[in-house]
Image (cartoon, helix red, strand yellow):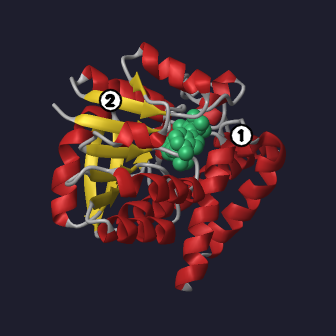
Amino acid sequence: MTTIAFLGLGNMGGPMAANLVAAGHTVAGYDPVPAAAAAAAENGVLLAETAVQAVERAAVVITMLPSGALVRSAYAEILPVAQDGAVFIDSSTISVDDARDMNTLAAEFGFAQVDAPVSGGVKGAVAGTLAFMVGGIDDAFAAASPVLEPMAGKVIHCGGPGSGQAAKVCNNMVLAVQQIVVGEAFVLAEKLGLSAESLFDVITGATGNCWSVHTNCPVPGPVPTSPANNDFRPGFATALMHKDLGLAMDAVSSTGATAPLGTHAAEIYAAFAESNGSKDFSAIIETLR
Ligand code: NAD
């Protein structure tokens, strides 16, 4: 079993660290917010007083932080004190450019590093069924994989450094566009006198089927577990979709790619997030009625 440092014990990191403990690993955790740290301690995470203290004896260092700037400052602090041979896994959602920079920086200190953002939300973090999209060289991926297993439903090696984040922004750009157009379709159906149940039955058996309908249906009824049945409690919060679309737009502009629908979706979610950040992102349908 491995000694793992886990930095960032929030909504995602807390349950991820708990699953590593449950799998028999020794987890030294650090989070500056006392409530987050205390919740992790209840699940067997050994609390460190600083990031440096958590990392000093660890063979694997996992970061699950809100932004690229925070990963940058954490790496600046911990890379100089990590033990020889330590493997770095960053599961935060950050920009592709930041992810590549972090990989280069870790390599300068002689460490293997992967970007390994996730999809599956807090539910997946608790259940240990997250999908990990991993970017890194083969040796780094091989070293990181066994540690990801207790937290994962699926681990996909997407390519070299930054490819995990690249896959994540591309996937979420698709998801945003789909959720908006599915909302448009249900509102159009209402206006045409077509019931939500009928439209759901047709789309889910036809070519328009996608997660935004079959799991995250934005009207109450057809999928009893979708956030629409629960006042749009997330689920996947609009604020996080807004953040991810911002990263997608950074990637679009830095590469010169053309993404008219993704760009429009980013604008729509930016406006919606101003006063609805805590709602599930399927609540975008409310702006279409
Ligand atoms: P969160 O805000 O709940 O948790 C982040 C934690 O990091 C906080 O507890 C914060 O105190 C801690 N932190 C900040 N600076 C730190 C530092 N220097 N050292 C240690 N800890 C520090 O956020 P979250 O929902 O857990 O998301 C974490 C990451 O996962 C984000 O990048 C997010 O975009 C991504 N993500 C979230 C979801 C989701 O559904 N919540 C899904 C997929 C990906």
Residue on which the image places disc 1: 283
- Give the quadrant of the N terminus: top left
**Above or below, comparing residue 233 to residue 281 in the picture:** above
Type of amino acid at the residue the image marks with label 1 = Ala
Image quadrant, ligand 1: top right
Q: Is residue 274 left or right of residue 232?
A: right
| Quarter of the figure with residue 236 | top right
* Residue that appears at 27% across and 61% down: 111
Label 1's element? helix
Residue displayed at 51% across by 55% down: 71
Q: Name the residue under label 2.
A: 27
Q: Does the rendering let one see residue 258?
A: no
Q: Quadrant of the C terminus?
A: top right
Residue 26 can be seen, yes or no: yes
Please name whichever residue, 39 or 171, is drawn nearer the observer in this view of the structure: 39
Assess disc 2: are there few (<14), some (14-19) or many (≥20) residues with their C-alpha within 10 Å of its C-alpha: many
Q: How many labels does the image show?
A: 2
Q: Where is residue 166 in the image (x, y as percent from the top left)?
A: 43, 66
Rendered position, 135 above or below 87? below
Label 1, label 2: how far apart the Cα atoms are: 37 Å
* Three-letter amino acid code at the position of disc 2: Val
Queried on whether the Cβ of the residue with tag 2 lies below 8 angstroms from ligand 1, the answer reads no
Does residue 141 lie above or below 278 as drawn?
A: below
The kind of secondary structure element at disc 2 is: strand
* In this rendering, position of residue 80 left or right of residue 197: left
